[in-house]
Amino acid sequence: MRISWFFGIMTITVMLLQAVMLGAAHAQEFEAPPLVMDIPVMHEEAIAAGIDHSYTGPWEYFVGGGAAGLDCNGDRRTDLFIAGGTSPAALYVNRSQTGGELRFEQVAMDVEPRLLTGVTGAYALDIDNDGHKDLVILRVDRNLLLKGGPDCSFANGSREFSFEGGREWTTAFAATFEKGEDFPSLAFGNYVDRTAPGTPWGTCHDNALFRPIRGGNAAPAYDAPTPLSPGYCTLSMLFTDWGRTGRPDLRMTNDRQYYRGGQEQLWRIEPGSPPRPYRPSEGWRTVKIWGMGIAEADLDADGFPEYALTSMGDTKLQTLDEDAEEGRPVYRDIAFERGATAHRPYTGENTRPSTGWHAEFADFNNDGRLDLFIAKGNVEQMPEFAAFDPDNLLLGAHDGRFVEAGDLAGVALPTKGRGAVIDDFNHDGMLDLLVVNRGGRASLFRNLGGRTPDNPAPVAMGNWLQIELSQIGSNRDAVGARISVKSGNETRVRTIQVGGGHASGRLGFVHVGLGVAERAQIRVQWPDGEWSAPYRVFANQFVHIDRGAASAQYWLPE
């Protein structure tokens, strides 16, 4: 019954969507710049690497399907916690050799087995500042806070953190350290209230912000949530300092399929004050999409980030309007002019609209320009949308536009992508990729190097840096910090964030492609706004920066 009404409501809206998109599709393909950059060769090796995992379940698990990347044993390799829906979630410890094939080992978790089912997504965060990454587990019913310990040990920490977990269907999460706080504020995004009269239409759950009650040496208590009402079936959220005020606000992307009178949201989060959404009188423009994922990047290094928003049909790419007055979040869409709409499959014969989920900016070919990965896949069996809907790998071109290379790179598989983790799993300086697929095995791609249209054999690509930050006391991983990397006349900016994507995130080394540059200068704007001294480093290095240190430290993986 639920599946039939889910599919039926789409028919009218999709007919209009396809008509609007048809002309834009041909125009965009004609104007796409040629592929003159290195194309990363992505080799799928999940089973060989030891990852045999699926995200399964009925209607409640059409959405979600995330994973968390974190170092849970102190070896600085990224381990993986992967949601399973009705299948148990699983923890995979990274055993990859430096520069070699990917290898992961599934390890048992000392958590009640029933709590590892019903999982939709996860994010890593050091909640209590003990130096161990904790896991925030999103579930259908009751969310969990798993307290991390040594050697990838985890225990249910919900009681210790006075966190009840709720009864909602949770699909989004983000965290930030508000000014003056020792512990993070936690935001949870919820989907449909399945118990409300008339469900699912117009019955979106409210979202919630959990601010820590205690500080200092005591454990934080998260027992007094603040409702973020109205909620509009949020599928991704992200704390972001959109106006560079030093105070992050909370951006949400919402699924118009079920809300009534809803829209995309930006909440003003001011320490010590109740949260409130920005209003049209403040410049916030009404946008209604089937919002599923958020990714942030400062594409032109002007200090003001851009946002990719995935949806059914075209992806949005929003930038702050150049005429916007200070403090007014007036955004315009630049996806079409940048070649980033990704509105239908780029290979195969199916011209029906795509369905986008996880989005993330990263430099896969180390040319110094950010690329955009989008996980794609039909919701289930919706005939009005593409059945074969491969993931996108949009490579950043020299003119600021994006060029599709998913088929040439090897990620165009017949899967139903949902969440993803992008990281250098084997410490060779090139970004690899995990994609969680609904109803099928997860995909794990090892980056073998680059090739050009004239040279199909993988070769070494551009130079790179991987940067790790730390500070003593609270917020040890410097969540909210901005990293500025300058080489020659180019400046590249990264922000350490917890949230966004689609039910997926990672916390660890920050990867920056450098192109041909052999040296770079790093400056860090720490979460409290203070800038570091410049650190001069060589390319192709893992760099650790401890706040206040006179120099950066190199780390050599074994």
Image: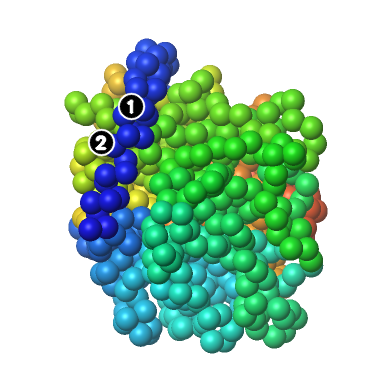
> What SS does tag 1 mark?
helix
> In the drawing, does residue 391 fall left or right of residue 314?
left
Q: Nearer the viewer, residue 296 or 276?
A: 276
- Determine whether, in the image, residue 78 is placed left or right of residue 266: left
Image point 68% across, 34% down: which residue? 330
Give the residue at the far front of this rendering: 197
Residue 197, quarter of picture: bottom left
Q: Find numbered disc 2 in the image and state the secondary structure of the residue it sits on.
A: loop
Which numbered marker is on residue 384? Answer: 2
Q: Are marks 1 and 2 in contact (CB under 8 Å)?
A: yes
Residue located 53% across and 33% down the image: 317
Instruction: State the image coordinates of residue 355 (x, y, percent, origin top left).
Output: 34, 40
Instruction: Check the image and report above or below for 481 versus 149.
Output: above
Q: Which mark is residue 249?
A: none
The residue type indicated by label 2 comes to: Glu
Q: Which residue bears the numbered disc 1?
A: 18
Q: Earlier in the sequence, mark 1 or mark 2?
A: 1
